[in-house]
Image (spheres, rainbow, N blue to C red):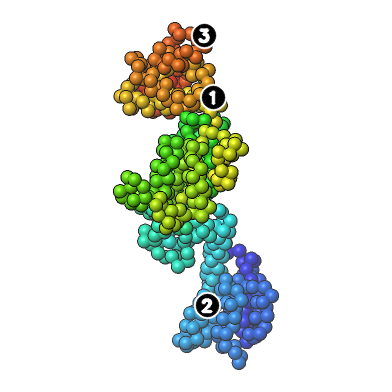
Protein backbone atom coordinates (compact mmCIF):
# COMPACT_ATOMS: atom_id res chain seq x y z
CA UNK A 1 0.00 0.00 0.00
CA UNK A 2 1.37 3.40 -1.02
CA UNK A 3 1.71 6.08 1.66
CA UNK A 4 0.44 9.00 -0.48
CA UNK A 5 1.67 11.73 1.86
CA UNK A 6 5.30 10.76 1.19
CA UNK A 7 5.13 11.48 -2.53
CA UNK A 8 5.51 14.79 -4.37
CA UNK A 9 3.74 15.24 -7.72
CA UNK A 10 4.11 18.01 -10.32
CA UNK A 11 1.25 18.62 -12.76
CA UNK A 12 2.20 20.57 -15.94
CA UNK A 13 -0.60 21.71 -18.31
CA UNK A 14 -1.31 24.99 -20.11
CA UNK A 15 -5.04 24.71 -19.37
CA UNK A 16 -5.86 26.16 -15.97
CA UNK A 17 -9.07 24.11 -15.59
CA UNK A 18 -7.22 20.85 -16.00
CA UNK A 19 -4.58 21.96 -13.49
CA UNK A 20 -7.25 22.84 -10.92
CA UNK A 21 -9.42 19.72 -11.38
CA UNK A 22 -6.65 17.12 -11.57
CA UNK A 23 -4.56 18.85 -8.92
CA UNK A 24 -7.48 18.88 -6.48
CA UNK A 25 -8.14 15.18 -7.18
CA UNK A 26 -4.55 14.23 -6.38
CA UNK A 27 -4.47 16.39 -3.25
CA UNK A 28 -7.61 14.63 -1.99
CA UNK A 29 -5.75 11.32 -2.39
CA UNK A 30 -3.15 12.67 0.02
CA UNK A 31 -0.36 13.54 -2.42
CA UNK A 32 1.74 16.67 -2.22
CA UNK A 33 0.95 18.47 -5.47
CA UNK A 34 2.44 21.46 -7.31
CA UNK A 35 1.22 22.79 -10.68
CA UNK A 36 2.90 24.66 -13.53
CA UNK A 37 1.62 26.05 -16.84
CA UNK A 38 4.84 26.10 -18.90
CA UNK A 39 8.23 24.54 -19.40
CA UNK A 40 10.15 27.26 -17.56
CA UNK A 41 7.99 27.26 -14.41
CA UNK A 42 8.01 23.47 -14.23
CA UNK A 43 11.77 23.25 -14.58
CA UNK A 44 12.28 25.92 -11.92
CA UNK A 45 10.15 23.95 -9.46
CA UNK A 46 11.94 20.67 -10.29
CA UNK A 47 15.32 22.32 -9.77
CA UNK A 48 14.45 23.39 -6.26
CA UNK A 49 13.44 19.88 -5.18
CA UNK A 50 13.03 16.72 -7.28
CA UNK A 51 9.56 15.20 -7.66
CA UNK A 52 8.56 11.56 -7.47
CA UNK A 53 6.09 11.85 -10.37
CA UNK A 54 5.50 14.48 -13.05
CA UNK A 55 2.47 14.69 -15.38
CA UNK A 56 3.22 16.65 -18.58
CA UNK A 57 0.96 17.62 -21.44
CA UNK A 58 2.70 16.77 -24.69
CA UNK A 59 1.30 19.89 -26.37
CA UNK A 60 2.02 22.88 -24.15
CA UNK A 61 1.17 26.35 -25.50
CA UNK A 62 3.95 27.18 -27.95
CA UNK A 63 6.16 24.45 -26.49
CA UNK A 64 6.74 20.70 -26.73
CA UNK A 65 6.27 18.62 -23.60
CA UNK A 66 8.88 16.16 -24.91
CA UNK A 67 11.56 18.79 -24.30
CA UNK A 68 10.44 19.17 -20.70
CA UNK A 69 10.48 15.36 -20.32
CA UNK A 70 14.12 15.30 -21.41
CA UNK A 71 15.04 18.13 -19.02
CA UNK A 72 13.24 16.51 -16.07
CA UNK A 73 14.97 13.16 -16.70
CA UNK A 74 18.34 14.87 -17.04
CA UNK A 75 17.73 16.69 -13.76
CA UNK A 76 16.38 13.66 -11.85
CA UNK A 77 16.59 10.26 -13.61
CA UNK A 78 14.65 8.60 -10.79
CA UNK A 79 11.57 10.78 -11.34
CA UNK A 80 8.72 8.98 -13.12
CA UNK A 81 7.02 10.92 -15.92
CA UNK A 82 3.56 10.36 -17.41
CA UNK A 83 2.51 12.25 -20.57
CA UNK A 84 -0.98 13.62 -21.42
CA UNK A 85 -1.82 13.29 -25.11
CA UNK A 86 -4.89 13.98 -27.20
CA UNK A 87 -3.96 11.30 -29.78
CA UNK A 88 -2.08 8.06 -28.93
CA UNK A 89 -1.14 7.52 -32.55
CA UNK A 90 0.98 10.59 -32.90
CA UNK A 91 4.71 9.95 -33.04
CA UNK A 92 5.46 12.13 -30.02
CA UNK A 93 3.63 9.73 -27.67
CA UNK A 94 5.85 6.84 -28.73
CA UNK A 95 8.90 9.08 -28.52
CA UNK A 96 7.96 10.03 -24.98
CA UNK A 97 8.03 6.42 -23.82
CA UNK A 98 11.28 5.82 -25.67
CA UNK A 99 12.84 8.85 -23.94
CA UNK A 100 11.99 7.57 -20.49
CA UNK A 101 8.31 8.34 -19.82
CA UNK A 102 6.62 5.70 -17.68
CA UNK A 103 3.41 5.84 -19.72
CA UNK A 104 0.89 8.22 -21.30
CA UNK A 105 -2.80 9.03 -20.68
CA UNK A 106 -5.37 10.00 -23.26
CA UNK A 107 -7.19 13.29 -22.97
CA UNK A 108 -9.74 13.97 -21.70
CA UNK A 109 -8.25 12.39 -18.59
CA UNK A 110 -10.52 10.04 -16.67
CA UNK A 111 -10.14 10.37 -12.92
CA UNK A 112 -9.93 6.63 -12.27
CA UNK A 113 -7.28 6.28 -15.01
CA UNK A 114 -5.25 9.10 -13.48
CA UNK A 115 -5.29 7.58 -9.98
CA UNK A 116 -4.54 4.07 -11.31
CA UNK A 117 -1.53 5.12 -13.35
CA UNK A 118 -0.39 7.36 -10.49
CA UNK A 119 -0.31 4.39 -8.10
CA UNK A 120 1.44 2.19 -10.67
CA UNK A 121 4.09 4.78 -11.48
CA UNK A 122 4.81 5.49 -7.80
CA UNK A 123 4.91 1.77 -7.02
CA UNK A 124 7.43 1.34 -9.83
CA UNK A 125 9.45 4.22 -8.45
CA UNK A 126 9.42 2.73 -4.97
CA UNK A 127 10.85 -0.54 -6.35
CA UNK A 128 13.49 1.32 -8.33
CA UNK A 129 14.40 3.42 -5.29
CA UNK A 130 14.76 0.28 -3.21
CA UNK A 131 16.96 -1.29 -5.85
CA UNK A 132 19.05 1.84 -6.04
CA UNK A 133 19.47 1.89 -2.25
CA UNK A 134 20.61 -1.73 -2.38
CA UNK A 135 22.96 -0.91 -5.22
CA UNK A 136 24.46 2.04 -3.33
CA UNK A 137 24.86 -0.05 -0.18
CA UNK A 138 26.43 -2.85 -2.18
CA UNK A 139 28.80 -0.42 -3.88
CA UNK A 140 29.73 1.04 -0.50
CA UNK A 141 30.41 -2.42 0.90
CA UNK A 142 32.34 -3.45 -2.20
CA UNK A 143 34.48 -0.32 -2.15
CA UNK A 144 35.30 -0.40 1.56
CA UNK A 145 35.97 -4.14 1.95
CA UNK A 146 39.62 -5.02 1.37
CA UNK A 147 38.71 -8.56 0.29
CA UNK A 148 38.14 -9.24 -3.38
CA UNK A 149 34.41 -9.77 -4.13
CA UNK A 150 33.18 -11.33 -7.37
CA UNK A 151 29.60 -11.95 -8.53
CA UNK A 152 28.59 -14.26 -11.36
CA UNK A 153 25.07 -14.67 -12.71
CA UNK A 154 23.16 -17.92 -13.10
CA UNK A 155 24.77 -18.48 -16.50
CA UNK A 156 28.27 -18.31 -15.01
CA UNK A 157 29.06 -14.88 -16.45
CA UNK A 158 30.88 -12.12 -14.60
CA UNK A 159 28.25 -9.71 -13.28
CA UNK A 160 30.09 -7.53 -10.81
CA UNK A 161 33.40 -7.17 -8.95
CA UNK A 162 34.93 -4.64 -6.58
CA UNK A 163 38.14 -2.65 -6.81
CA UNK A 164 40.03 -5.20 -4.70
CA UNK A 165 39.16 -7.94 -7.22
CA UNK A 166 40.53 -5.71 -9.93
CA UNK A 167 43.75 -5.05 -8.04
CA UNK A 168 44.31 -8.57 -6.72
CA UNK A 169 42.99 -10.75 -9.54
CA UNK A 170 43.16 -8.44 -12.56
CA UNK A 171 39.44 -8.07 -13.37
CA UNK A 172 38.53 -5.12 -15.61
CA UNK A 173 35.22 -3.65 -16.82
CA UNK A 174 35.66 -5.07 -20.32
CA UNK A 175 35.28 -8.57 -18.82
CA UNK A 176 31.74 -7.91 -17.50
CA UNK A 177 29.36 -10.35 -19.14
CA UNK A 178 32.16 -12.80 -20.01
CA UNK A 179 31.90 -16.46 -19.00
CA UNK A 180 34.23 -16.85 -16.01
CA UNK A 181 35.52 -20.21 -17.25
CA UNK A 182 36.84 -18.40 -20.35
CA UNK A 183 38.74 -15.78 -18.33
CA UNK A 184 42.43 -16.60 -17.85
CA UNK A 185 44.77 -14.64 -15.60
CA UNK A 186 47.47 -17.32 -15.67
CA UNK A 187 46.82 -18.14 -12.00
CA UNK A 188 45.46 -21.69 -12.21
CA UNK A 189 41.80 -20.66 -11.96
CA UNK A 190 41.03 -22.26 -8.56
CA UNK A 191 38.75 -19.38 -7.56
CA UNK A 192 36.74 -19.43 -10.77
CA UNK A 193 36.45 -23.22 -10.56
CA UNK A 194 35.04 -22.89 -7.02
CA UNK A 195 32.51 -20.28 -8.26
CA UNK A 196 31.22 -22.59 -10.98
CA UNK A 197 31.12 -25.60 -8.66
CA UNK A 198 28.92 -23.65 -6.25
CA UNK A 199 26.72 -22.51 -9.14
CA UNK A 200 26.17 -26.07 -10.34
CA UNK A 201 25.83 -27.74 -6.93
CA UNK A 202 23.98 -24.95 -5.08
CA UNK A 203 26.32 -25.52 -2.10
CA UNK A 204 28.89 -23.17 -0.56
CA UNK A 205 32.59 -23.92 -0.96
CA UNK A 206 35.61 -22.82 1.02
CA UNK A 207 39.27 -23.25 0.11
CA UNK A 208 41.74 -22.35 2.85
CA UNK A 209 45.18 -20.86 2.28
CA UNK A 210 46.41 -21.99 -1.09
CA UNK A 211 49.13 -20.46 -3.23
CA UNK A 212 47.91 -18.12 -5.95
CA UNK A 213 50.15 -16.55 -8.58
CA UNK A 214 48.92 -13.00 -9.18
CA UNK A 215 48.86 -11.38 -12.65
CA UNK A 216 52.14 -9.59 -11.83
CA UNK A 217 53.85 -12.87 -10.99
CA UNK A 218 53.90 -12.53 -7.19
CA UNK A 219 52.84 -15.61 -5.23
CA UNK A 220 50.30 -14.90 -2.50
CA UNK A 221 48.46 -17.07 0.02
CA UNK A 222 44.69 -16.64 -0.37
CA UNK A 223 41.46 -18.17 0.91
CA UNK A 224 38.13 -18.18 -0.96
CA UNK A 225 34.55 -18.68 0.13
CA UNK A 226 31.75 -19.03 -2.43
CA UNK A 227 28.05 -18.72 -1.57
CA UNK A 228 25.01 -19.27 -3.85
CA UNK A 229 22.53 -16.42 -4.28
CA UNK A 230 19.18 -18.15 -3.94
CA UNK A 231 15.97 -16.59 -5.27
CA UNK A 232 12.42 -17.88 -4.79
CA UNK A 233 11.69 -21.62 -4.89
CA UNK A 234 15.36 -22.43 -4.19
CA UNK A 235 16.50 -21.23 -7.61
CA UNK A 236 20.15 -20.13 -7.78
CA UNK A 237 20.33 -16.72 -9.39
CA UNK A 238 24.11 -16.44 -9.12
CA UNK A 239 27.13 -16.88 -6.86
CA UNK A 240 29.23 -14.48 -4.82
CA UNK A 241 32.88 -15.20 -4.00
CA UNK A 242 34.98 -13.51 -1.33
CA UNK A 243 38.74 -13.88 -1.78
CA UNK A 244 40.96 -12.92 1.13
CA UNK A 245 44.69 -12.34 0.79
CA UNK A 246 46.18 -13.97 3.90
CA UNK A 247 49.84 -13.68 2.96
CA UNK A 248 50.63 -11.16 5.70
CA UNK A 249 48.81 -13.26 8.30
CA UNK A 250 50.70 -16.40 7.29
CA UNK A 251 53.99 -14.51 7.47
CA UNK A 252 53.07 -13.14 10.89
CA UNK A 253 52.11 -16.58 12.17
CA UNK A 254 55.36 -17.94 10.79
CA UNK A 255 57.34 -15.23 12.57
CA UNK A 256 55.58 -15.88 15.88
CA UNK A 257 55.80 -19.65 15.71
CA UNK A 258 59.12 -21.34 16.32
CA UNK A 259 60.10 -23.45 13.36
CA UNK A 260 61.77 -26.79 13.99
CA UNK A 261 63.14 -26.95 10.46
CA UNK A 262 64.06 -24.43 7.80
CA UNK A 263 65.09 -25.73 4.40
CA UNK A 264 67.33 -28.64 5.53
CA UNK A 265 68.46 -27.00 8.77
CA UNK A 266 67.18 -28.58 12.00
CA UNK A 267 66.69 -26.55 15.17
CA UNK A 268 64.04 -24.92 17.33
CA UNK A 269 66.30 -22.93 19.67
CA UNK A 270 66.38 -19.14 19.79
CA UNK A 271 69.80 -18.90 18.06
CA UNK A 272 68.48 -20.96 15.16
CA UNK A 273 65.29 -18.89 14.90
CA UNK A 274 67.52 -15.85 14.43
CA UNK A 275 69.49 -17.68 11.73
CA UNK A 276 66.26 -18.56 9.89
CA UNK A 277 65.15 -14.92 9.95
CA UNK A 278 68.53 -13.72 8.70
CA UNK A 279 68.54 -16.25 5.86
CA UNK A 280 65.06 -15.12 4.79
CA UNK A 281 66.13 -11.48 4.90
CA UNK A 282 69.27 -12.14 2.82
CA UNK A 283 67.88 -14.72 0.39
CA UNK A 284 66.89 -12.27 -2.37
CA UNK A 285 69.76 -9.84 -1.82
CA UNK A 286 72.72 -10.27 -4.23
CA UNK A 287 75.16 -9.18 -1.53
CA UNK A 288 78.16 -11.37 -0.70
CA UNK A 289 77.69 -13.22 2.59
CA UNK A 290 80.45 -14.52 4.88
CA UNK A 291 79.38 -17.39 7.14
CA UNK A 292 81.39 -17.89 10.33
CA UNK A 293 81.10 -20.99 12.42
CA UNK A 294 82.98 -23.85 14.01
CA UNK A 295 83.52 -27.01 12.00
CA UNK A 296 80.34 -29.06 11.83
CA UNK A 297 77.86 -26.26 12.56
CA UNK A 298 76.16 -26.50 9.15
CA UNK A 299 77.70 -23.70 7.12
CA UNK A 300 77.03 -25.48 3.83
CA UNK A 301 73.38 -26.05 4.79
CA UNK A 302 72.98 -22.33 5.51
CA UNK A 303 74.60 -21.42 2.17
CA UNK A 304 72.24 -23.84 0.43
CA UNK A 305 69.25 -22.27 2.22
CA UNK A 306 70.37 -18.78 1.14
CA UNK A 307 70.47 -19.95 -2.48
CA UNK A 308 67.32 -22.08 -2.64
CA UNK A 309 65.15 -19.65 -0.65
CA UNK A 310 65.94 -16.74 -2.96
CA UNK A 311 65.34 -15.69 -6.54
CA UNK A 312 68.35 -17.66 -7.84
CA UNK A 313 66.88 -20.98 -6.70
CA UNK A 314 66.38 -22.26 -10.27
CA UNK A 315 69.97 -21.41 -11.22
CA UNK A 316 73.12 -23.44 -10.33
CA UNK A 317 74.40 -23.78 -6.77
CA UNK A 318 78.08 -24.64 -7.13
CA UNK A 319 80.29 -25.63 -4.18
CA UNK A 320 84.08 -25.51 -3.81
CA UNK A 321 86.09 -26.72 -0.80
CA UNK A 322 89.05 -24.36 -0.98
CA UNK A 323 91.15 -26.32 1.54
CA UNK A 324 90.96 -29.55 -0.42
CA UNK A 325 92.90 -28.27 -3.46
CA UNK A 326 96.40 -26.97 -4.09
CA UNK A 327 96.85 -23.43 -5.39
CA UNK A 328 97.18 -24.44 -9.05
CA UNK A 329 94.31 -26.88 -8.93
CA UNK A 330 92.08 -24.38 -7.12
CA UNK A 331 92.80 -21.72 -9.76
CA UNK A 332 91.87 -24.18 -12.49
CA UNK A 333 88.73 -25.28 -10.63
CA UNK A 334 87.54 -21.72 -10.02
CA UNK A 335 88.44 -20.03 -13.29
CA UNK A 336 88.95 -22.89 -15.74
CA UNK A 337 91.86 -23.25 -18.13
CA UNK A 338 92.61 -23.48 -21.82
CA UNK A 339 94.41 -26.31 -23.51
CA UNK A 340 98.17 -26.14 -22.98
CA UNK A 341 97.96 -23.74 -20.04
CA UNK A 342 100.11 -26.12 -17.99
CA UNK A 343 101.41 -29.65 -18.10
CA UNK A 344 98.46 -32.01 -18.25
CA UNK A 345 96.02 -29.39 -19.60
CA UNK A 346 95.14 -31.40 -22.71
CA UNK A 347 91.65 -29.89 -23.15
CA UNK A 348 89.82 -26.69 -22.31
CA UNK A 349 88.04 -26.70 -18.97
CA UNK A 350 85.16 -24.56 -17.73
CA UNK A 351 85.65 -23.28 -14.18
CA UNK A 352 83.21 -23.16 -11.28
CA UNK A 353 82.55 -19.44 -11.80
CA UNK A 354 81.22 -20.10 -15.30
CA UNK A 355 79.22 -23.09 -14.09
CA UNK A 356 77.61 -20.90 -11.40
CA UNK A 357 76.66 -18.10 -13.85
CA UNK A 358 73.27 -16.71 -12.84
CA UNK A 359 73.37 -18.64 -9.56
CA UNK A 360 75.51 -18.96 -6.44
CA UNK A 361 79.11 -20.03 -5.81
CA UNK A 362 79.81 -21.33 -2.31
CA UNK A 363 83.47 -21.04 -1.29
CA UNK A 364 83.97 -23.20 1.80
CA UNK A 365 87.12 -22.80 3.95
CA UNK A 366 87.87 -19.48 2.24
CA UNK A 367 90.66 -18.75 4.75
CA UNK A 368 92.86 -21.44 3.15
CA UNK A 369 93.25 -19.83 -0.30
CA UNK A 370 96.70 -18.59 -1.33
CA UNK A 371 97.61 -14.91 -1.90
CA UNK A 372 97.56 -15.47 -5.68
CA UNK A 373 94.03 -16.87 -5.63
CA UNK A 374 93.00 -14.13 -3.20
CA UNK A 375 94.12 -11.52 -5.74
CA UNK A 376 92.22 -13.17 -8.60
CA UNK A 377 89.12 -13.63 -6.46
CA UNK A 378 89.18 -9.95 -5.48
CA UNK A 379 89.06 -8.95 -9.16
CA UNK A 380 86.00 -11.12 -9.77
CA UNK A 381 84.23 -9.53 -6.80
CA UNK A 382 85.13 -6.01 -7.96
CA UNK A 383 84.60 -6.31 -11.72
CA UNK A 384 82.48 -9.48 -12.17
CA UNK A 385 84.99 -10.80 -14.70
CA UNK A 386 88.03 -13.09 -14.83
CA UNK A 387 90.38 -14.84 -17.25
CA UNK A 388 90.85 -18.57 -17.55
CA UNK A 389 94.27 -19.94 -16.66
CA UNK A 390 96.47 -19.61 -19.76
CA UNK A 391 94.20 -17.06 -21.48
CA UNK A 392 93.86 -13.27 -21.38
CA UNK A 393 90.28 -12.98 -22.66
CA UNK A 394 88.03 -11.55 -19.90
CA UNK A 395 84.84 -13.48 -19.16
CA UNK A 396 81.87 -11.69 -17.57
CA UNK A 397 79.81 -13.58 -14.98
CA UNK A 398 76.79 -12.93 -12.78
CA UNK A 399 77.49 -14.95 -9.64
CA UNK A 400 76.53 -14.43 -6.02
CA UNK A 401 79.39 -15.35 -3.68
CA UNK A 402 78.78 -17.03 -0.33
CA UNK A 403 81.97 -17.79 1.60
CA UNK A 404 82.44 -19.75 4.79
CA UNK A 405 85.24 -20.20 7.32
CA UNK A 406 85.88 -21.59 10.78
CA UNK A 407 88.85 -19.27 11.23
CA UNK A 408 89.12 -15.67 12.41
CA UNK A 409 89.65 -13.76 9.15
CA UNK A 410 89.97 -10.44 10.96
CA UNK A 411 92.92 -11.82 12.93
CA UNK A 412 94.42 -13.24 9.73
CA UNK A 413 94.20 -9.77 8.17
CA UNK A 414 96.09 -8.36 11.17
CA UNK A 415 98.75 -11.04 10.71
CA UNK A 416 99.04 -10.28 6.99
CA UNK A 417 97.99 -13.74 5.82
CA UNK A 418 94.68 -12.61 4.32
CA UNK A 419 94.14 -9.56 2.11
CA UNK A 420 92.30 -6.77 3.88
CA UNK A 421 90.53 -5.57 0.70
CA UNK A 422 89.29 -9.09 -0.05
CA UNK A 423 88.11 -9.49 3.55
CA UNK A 424 85.98 -6.33 3.25
CA UNK A 425 84.57 -7.53 -0.07
CA UNK A 426 83.63 -10.90 1.41
CA UNK A 427 82.38 -9.59 4.74
CA UNK A 428 79.62 -7.32 3.39
CA UNK A 429 77.15 -9.26 5.52
CA UNK A 430 78.37 -11.62 8.22
CA UNK A 431 76.37 -14.56 9.53
CA UNK A 432 77.68 -16.37 12.62
CA UNK A 433 76.42 -19.89 13.33
CA UNK A 434 76.08 -21.02 16.93
CA UNK A 435 77.95 -24.08 18.15
CA UNK A 436 75.92 -27.08 19.29
CA UNK A 437 76.77 -26.38 22.94
CA UNK A 438 75.07 -22.98 22.46
CA UNK A 439 71.88 -24.64 21.19
CA UNK A 440 71.44 -27.64 23.49
CA UNK A 441 67.66 -27.24 23.13
CA UNK A 442 68.01 -28.64 19.60
CA UNK A 443 69.72 -31.90 20.56
CA UNK A 444 66.48 -33.85 21.09
CA UNK A 445 65.16 -32.67 17.71
CA UNK A 446 68.45 -33.54 16.00
CA UNK A 447 68.47 -37.00 17.60
CA UNK A 448 64.96 -37.61 16.27
CA UNK A 449 66.05 -36.42 12.81
CA UNK A 450 69.11 -38.72 12.73
CA UNK A 451 67.05 -41.65 14.02
CA UNK A 452 64.71 -41.31 11.05
CA UNK A 453 67.55 -40.71 8.59
CA UNK A 454 69.59 -43.77 9.58
CA UNK A 455 66.60 -46.01 10.17
CA UNK A 456 65.78 -45.40 6.50
CA UNK A 457 69.39 -45.79 5.34
CA UNK A 458 70.30 -48.82 7.49
CA UNK A 459 66.86 -50.48 7.31
CA UNK A 460 66.57 -50.45 11.11
CA UNK A 461 63.66 -49.94 13.51
CA UNK A 462 65.32 -48.10 16.39
CA UNK A 463 62.88 -45.68 17.96
CA UNK A 464 64.82 -43.83 20.66
CA UNK A 465 67.74 -43.49 23.07
CA UNK A 466 67.87 -44.20 26.79
CA UNK A 467 67.68 -41.42 29.34
CA UNK A 468 71.37 -41.78 30.26
CA UNK A 469 72.31 -41.43 26.59
CA UNK A 470 70.26 -38.24 26.33
CA UNK A 471 71.79 -36.98 29.60
CA UNK A 472 75.25 -37.58 28.15
CA UNK A 473 74.31 -35.81 24.92
CA UNK A 474 73.14 -32.79 26.92
CA UNK A 475 76.30 -32.65 29.05
CA UNK A 476 78.88 -33.36 26.35
CA UNK A 477 80.53 -30.19 24.87
CA UNK A 478 80.39 -31.41 21.22
CA UNK A 479 83.63 -29.93 19.83
CA UNK A 480 82.65 -31.37 16.44
CA UNK A 481 79.14 -29.85 16.72
CA UNK A 482 76.22 -31.30 14.72
CA UNK A 483 78.56 -33.33 12.51
CA UNK A 484 79.94 -35.09 15.60
CA UNK A 485 76.42 -35.75 16.91
CA UNK A 486 75.43 -37.27 13.59
CA UNK A 487 78.54 -39.45 13.58
CA UNK A 488 77.74 -40.62 17.13
CA UNK A 489 74.15 -41.47 16.16
CA UNK A 490 75.22 -43.37 13.02
CA UNK A 491 77.87 -45.28 15.00
CA UNK A 492 75.33 -46.20 17.70
CA UNK A 493 72.66 -47.29 15.23
CA UNK A 494 75.13 -49.58 13.44
CA UNK A 495 76.07 -51.28 16.72
CA UNK A 496 72.64 -51.25 18.38
CA UNK A 497 70.96 -54.68 18.45
CA UNK A 498 67.74 -53.60 20.16
CA UNK A 499 65.15 -50.94 19.43
CA UNK A 500 66.66 -48.50 21.94
CA UNK A 501 70.17 -46.97 21.82
CA UNK A 502 72.08 -47.37 25.10
CA UNK A 503 75.45 -46.13 26.36
CA UNK A 504 77.43 -49.15 25.17
CA UNK A 505 76.44 -48.35 21.58
CA UNK A 506 78.11 -44.91 21.64
CA UNK A 507 81.62 -44.07 20.33
CA UNK A 508 84.42 -44.50 22.84
CA UNK A 509 85.36 -40.80 22.91
CA UNK A 510 81.91 -39.92 24.24
CA UNK A 511 82.04 -42.63 26.91
CA UNK A 512 85.44 -41.41 28.09
CA UNK A 513 83.95 -37.95 28.59
CA UNK A 514 80.88 -39.33 30.42
CA UNK A 515 80.32 -37.74 33.88
CA UNK A 516 80.14 -40.20 36.77
CA UNK A 517 76.67 -38.96 37.66
CA UNK A 518 75.15 -40.76 34.67
CA UNK A 519 73.83 -44.22 35.59
CA UNK A 520 74.83 -46.88 33.09
CA UNK A 521 71.98 -49.17 34.12
CA UNK A 522 69.14 -46.88 33.05
CA UNK A 523 67.03 -48.23 30.16
CA UNK A 524 64.12 -45.85 30.10
CA UNK A 525 63.04 -44.30 26.83
CA UNK A 526 64.21 -40.95 25.54
CA UNK A 527 62.30 -37.86 26.77
CA UNK A 528 59.00 -37.17 24.98
CA UNK A 529 59.10 -35.01 21.85
CA UNK A 530 55.98 -32.89 21.67
CA UNK A 531 57.09 -31.46 18.35
CA UNK A 532 56.46 -34.83 16.66
CA UNK A 533 53.16 -35.55 14.97
CA UNK A 534 51.36 -38.81 15.71
CA UNK A 535 52.17 -40.03 12.19
CA UNK A 536 55.89 -39.29 12.67
CA UNK A 537 55.95 -41.03 16.05
CA UNK A 538 54.20 -44.11 14.63
CA UNK A 539 56.66 -44.15 11.74
CA UNK A 540 59.64 -43.98 14.10
CA UNK A 541 58.10 -46.71 16.28
CA UNK A 542 57.46 -48.91 13.22
CA UNK A 543 53.72 -48.82 13.93
CA UNK A 544 54.05 -49.81 17.60
CA UNK A 545 51.46 -47.65 19.40
CA UNK A 546 53.00 -48.13 22.84
CA UNK A 547 56.38 -46.87 21.62
CA UNK A 548 54.73 -44.01 19.73
CA UNK A 549 52.92 -42.97 22.93
CA UNK A 550 56.23 -43.06 24.80
CA UNK A 551 57.86 -40.84 22.19
CA UNK A 552 55.02 -38.34 22.37
CA UNK A 553 54.80 -38.40 26.17
CA UNK A 554 51.11 -39.36 26.11
CA UNK A 555 49.15 -42.42 27.15
CA UNK A 556 48.53 -45.35 24.82
CA UNK A 557 44.80 -44.75 25.28
CA UNK A 558 45.23 -41.21 23.90
CA UNK A 559 46.99 -42.63 20.84
CA UNK A 560 44.10 -45.05 20.22
CA UNK A 561 41.57 -42.23 20.67
CA UNK A 562 43.39 -40.00 18.19
CA UNK A 563 43.44 -42.87 15.70
CA UNK A 564 39.69 -43.37 16.20
CA UNK A 565 40.16 -46.93 17.44
Residue closer to the observer: 553 or 325 = 325
Residue closer to the observer: 258 or 535 = 258
Above or below — where is 34 with respect to 455? below
Label 2 or label 3, whichever lies nearer to me, is 3
Label 2 or label 1, whichever lies nearer to me, is 1
Sequence-wise, which precedes: disc 3 or disc 1?
A: 1
Residue closer to the observer: 554 or 480 = 480
- Identify the residue at image location x=46%, y=13%: 511
Q: What residue sits right under mark 1 in the picture?
A: 437
Residue closer to the observer: 313 or 91 = 313
Q: Quadrant of residue 45?
A: bottom right
**Residue 341 image offset from top left, x and y in percent:** 37, 50
Q: Secondary structure at mark 2?
A: loop
Is residue 276 visible in the rendered image? The answer is no
Q: What residue sits right under mark 3 in the picture?
A: 516
Above or below — where is 446 with respect to 328? above
Amino acid sequence: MIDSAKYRILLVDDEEGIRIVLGTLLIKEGYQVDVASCHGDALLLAQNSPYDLVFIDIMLAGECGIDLLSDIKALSPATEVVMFTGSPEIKTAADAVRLGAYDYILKPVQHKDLLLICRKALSEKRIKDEQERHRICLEAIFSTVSDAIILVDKKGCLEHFNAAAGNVCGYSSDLLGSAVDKIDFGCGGKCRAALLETLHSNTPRELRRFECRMPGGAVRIVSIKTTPLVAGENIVSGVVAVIRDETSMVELERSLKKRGQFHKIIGVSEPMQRIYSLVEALADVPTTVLIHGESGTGKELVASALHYTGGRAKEPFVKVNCSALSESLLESELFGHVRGAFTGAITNKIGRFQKAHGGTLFLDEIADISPTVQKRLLRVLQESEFEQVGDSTPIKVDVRIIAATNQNLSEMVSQGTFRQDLYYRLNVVSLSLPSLKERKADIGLLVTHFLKKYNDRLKRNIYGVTTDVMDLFLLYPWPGNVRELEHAMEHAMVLCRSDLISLENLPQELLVAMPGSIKRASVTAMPPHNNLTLEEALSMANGNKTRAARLLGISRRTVYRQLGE
